[in-house]
């Protein structure tokens, strides 16, 4: 007979895997390419204006997805403190996968194209989208393992560093998505 803890552990990981498979299949069904059409798979794309941005395994926006995980952990811990952590992780993966699908709809792609740094944005490859979900899971795991002050410090350091280096981050992305600010756009346009 199985122990209840082992069965719930397997169920949570099966849910995470199932959500990610569904994410990949839905994105591909929406016309997203599996891999970058450039013909290469790269671990990192550092040029914020590269057409390979959001097409490869990781890029500057990977840090935003780690911050998503930190935020989801904190929010779900506050809202569902009695729920086992792997169940909260499965919910976080569901939220992230839902965002990844929404982010790749024509309406959101067009909204992003209005931003200074995303003028040529074509959506994510399935590889990049799944990597974003894994990055969120890394952020969730960090938040679960580290003291909350360290987790907050990591999120702030990521936001400030990426903002300084490439003139974009999760905070600016959300602000520009909600309302375009000419001063932010001018600052972002200055990035090389």
Image (spheres, rainbow, N blue to C red):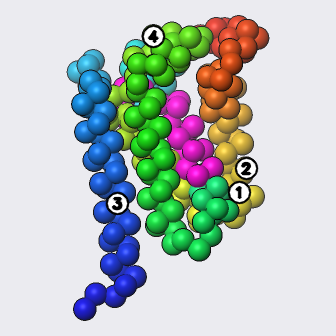
Residue 13, compared with residue 9, is above or below; it is above
Query: Which picture quadrant has residue 76?
Result: bottom right
Specify the quadrant that holds the N terminus. Answer: bottom left
Q: Which of the labelled discs sits on residue 153, or is there none? A: 2
Determine if residue 97 is in view.
yes
What distance separates the C-alpha of mark 2 from that of mark 1? 5 Å
Residue 115, compared with residue 6, is above or below; it is above
Give the extent of the magenta segment.
Answer: 54-72
Q: Which of the labelled discs sits on residue 120, or is there none? A: 4
* In magenta stretch: residue 165: no
SS for callout 2 = helix
Residue that numbered label 1 is attached to? 150
What residue is at 76 percent from the left and 11 percent from the top?
183
The label nearer to you, 1 versus 3, is 3
The label nearer to you, 2 versus 3, is 3
Determine if residue 118 is in view.
no
What distance separates the C-alpha of mark 1 from that of mark 4? 36 Å
What distance separates the C-alpha of mark 4 from that of mark 3? 34 Å
SS for callout 1 = helix
Residue that numbered label 3 is attached to? 15
The label nearer to you, 4 versus 3, is 3
Q: Earlier in the sequence, mark 1 or mark 3?
A: 3
> Is 72 positioned to the left or the right of 99 in the image?
right
Q: Earlier in the sequence, mark 4 or mark 2?
A: 4
Residue 43 location in percent, x, y?
37, 35
Marks 2,1: beta carbons within 8 A: yes
Residue 75 location in percent, x, y?
64, 55
Marks 1,4: beta carbons within 8 A: no
What residue is at 25 percent from the left and 31 percent from the top?
28
């Amino acid at each position: 007979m199985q122990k209840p803890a082992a069965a719930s552990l397997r169920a949570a990981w099966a849910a995470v895997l199932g959500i990610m498979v569904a994410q990949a299949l839905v994105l591909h069904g929406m016309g997203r390419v599996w891999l970058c059409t450039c013909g290469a798979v790269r671990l990192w794309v550092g040029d914020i204006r590269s057409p390979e941005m959001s097409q490869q395994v990781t890029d500057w926006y990977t840090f935003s997805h780690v911050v998503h995980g930190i935020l989801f952990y904190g929010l779900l811990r506050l809202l569902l403190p009695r729920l086992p952590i792997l169940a909260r992780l499965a919910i976080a993966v569901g939220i992230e996968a839902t965002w990844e699908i929404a982010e790749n709809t024509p309406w959101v792609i067009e909204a992003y194209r209005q931003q200074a740094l995303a003028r040529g944005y074509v959506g994510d490859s399935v590889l990049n989208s799944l990597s974003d979900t894994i990055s969120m899971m890394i952020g969730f795991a960090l938040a679960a393992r580290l003291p909350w002050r360290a987790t907050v410090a990591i999120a702030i350091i990521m936001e400030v560093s990426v903002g300084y280096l490439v003139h974009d981050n999760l905070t600016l992305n959300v602000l520009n998505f909600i309302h375009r600010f000419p001063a932010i756009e001018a600052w972002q346009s200055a990035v090389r």
